[in-house]
Amino acid sequence: MTGRPIPAPPLPEGPPPPVGRPPLTWLYVPGDRPEVVAKALGSGADVVIVDLEDAVAPDRKEYARSATAELLGDQVTAAPDAVPVHVRVHGEDDIRALADLPGLTAFRLPKITHAVSVHHVAAVAPGVALYPLLESALAIEHAYSIASAHHAVRGIALGEADLRADLGVREDAGLDWPRSRVVVAARAAALPPPAQSVFPDVRDLDGLWTSCGRGRLLGMLGRAAIHPRQLPVIERAFRPTAEEIEAAEEIVAASAVEAGALALPDGRFVDAAVVASARRTIALAGRGRDGGPARGAGGVGGLPEGGRG
């Protein structure tokens, strides 16, 4: 057998790599509460998600869209160093109203089940980053086709509240397989690791910590939150430990001396994939030293404490 590689289709290139450190905290806020959204932008969350779907009552949808349009049209929100703002849309009217505003970073698309829906939104809002949310058994079955549907897709995530109901799952362990499925689909589509869905009990920080640990073991990175008190717990749960940082630095240092596969002094064998993982660990280690949110701290009073998908 020659040294030529086995023929295979090219791997997906995926979107451009993100600039700076990977986000770990994604804070949902209701779109019909502009004063709460304003506080959320100073909470220390890496990304603020303005929710126009489940968090807003039907008779306040239009007001929420108008308030969000005003926010996204503000030059302060659109500044290069501003906190990224995603919008979880309720429908196509939201997409058409908000797509061209300078403060918009991305749309989060609820209840996506097929790649064709992603193609439609990408055509309606060209150039806008998209994050499909998989919230049903059918969506999980189509995870890779959704993740790889269009170059505008920058990530995928689960909507676990609806998914639990669809699957009849009560315990957190019952979501291990769907979580693993989206991790694999994202990787296969050359997307970043998915963030975990929200933990609905904002008072149970021990439970949040345990659940984050389970998600991290499955390959997830970061988590959505519904209250600022959850942010430091999520940050700490997904940041690498001192031992992981030390091991990653050793791998990267060794790779700088010897290219390709190599053996470390302790006998561990590492290759390019292991080196790439070590570099990601070091990037995460560069975040806030105290384990808190990367950009400041502070609470957001008056946030609803109901779950979001």
Image: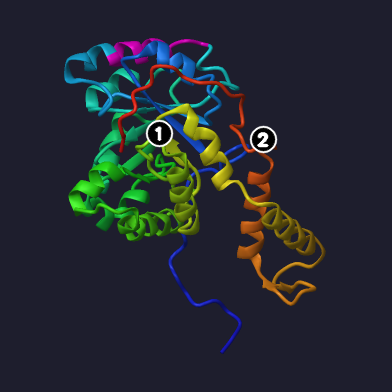
- In the image, 181: left or right of 247? left
- Depth check, mark 1 against mark 2: the one in front is 1
User: Please, what secondary structure does the residue beneath circle 1 have?
Assistant: loop
**Residue at 27% in and 22% down:** 94
The C terminus lies in which quarter of the figure? top left
Q: Which residues are magenta?
A: 64-75
In magenta segment, residue 69: yes
- In the image, 134: left or right of 291? left
Q: Which mark is residue 288?
A: 2
Rendering coords of residue 143 (x, y %): 31, 54
| Amino acid identity at mark 1 | Val
- Vertical position of residue 298 compared to residue 117: above or below: above
Q: Is residue 158 visible?
A: yes
User: Please, what secondary structure does the residue beneath circle 2 have?
Assistant: loop
Is tag 1's residue or tag 2's residue first in the polypeptide sequence? 1
- Vertical position of residue 254 compared to residue 240: above or below: below
**Residue at 67% in and 53% down:** 279
Tell how many labels: 2
- Vertical position of residue 29 compared to residue 255: above or below: above
Task: Determine which residue is flagged by label 1.
Answer: 202
Are there few (<14), some (14-19), or many (20+) residues within 10 Å of tag 1? some
- In the image, 130: left or right of 283? left
Rendering coords of residue 230 (x, y %): 48, 34
Rendering coords of residue 195 (x, y %): 44, 45
Disc 1 from disc 2: Cα separation:
23 Å
**Residue at 17% in and 15% down:** 59
